[in-house]
Image (cartoon, rainbow, N blue to C red):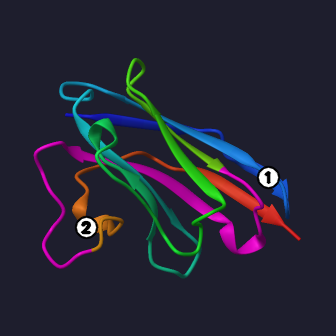
Amino acid sequence: QVQLVESGGGSVQAGGSLRLSCVASGEGANRIHMGWFRQAPGKEREGVGVNYLLGANTFYADSVAGRFTISRDYTKNAIYLEMNNLNPEDSGMYYCAARPWYAQAIEGLAPWDSRNYHYWGQGTQVTVSS
């Protein structure tokens, strides 16, 4: 089973930047689609962005498009989320998620829908103050 470990969360003032990392390990960790999700207290988990294996496609939620950038390092089985121009609405627990390359998105769901994903990390907290 694939295991995911996030890191890089922390506290930052509005307008600042953070870079999150997620490293996958275990059998099949080098053949996965990966994505980032976040959840604020009292709210449902929402997709931030996803990246298909080998860059077949990358998708971003409207709320972060233009500010967040996903990149991957296949030599490390890692995915990164560079977050710029952060605002308090970006605060929440950020999760890394993955699914096997052959498991496509469920018909009718957006690529960043969390229901498309099989494996989840424990999360890393991001707090943006005004």
Circle 2 residues within 10 Å: few <14, some 14–19, many ≥20 = few
Q: Of the residues shown, which amino acid type is indicated by label 1?
A: Ser
Q: Is residue 73 above or below residue 75?
A: below
**In this rendering, is residue 24 above or below 36?**
above
* Residue under label 1: 11
Residue nearest the observer in this picture, 15 or 118:
15
Q: Secondary structure at mark 1?
A: strand
In the displayed image of the protein, which residue is found farthest to the top? 75
**Residue 33's x, y, as percent?**
28, 45
Segment colored magenta: 83-109
Q: Is residue 21 left or right of residue 67?
A: left
Residue 126 drawn at (x, y percent)? 68, 56
Q: Amino acid at mark 2?
A: Arg
Earlier in the chain: of badge 2 and badge 1, it is 1
Question: Is disc 2 in contact with disc 1, using a CB cutoff of under 8 Å?
Answer: no
Measured from the top left, where is residue 101 in percent x and y?
Answer: 17, 42
Find disc 2 in the rendering and name its residue.
115
> Which residue is depicted at the point 17% across and 79% down?
108
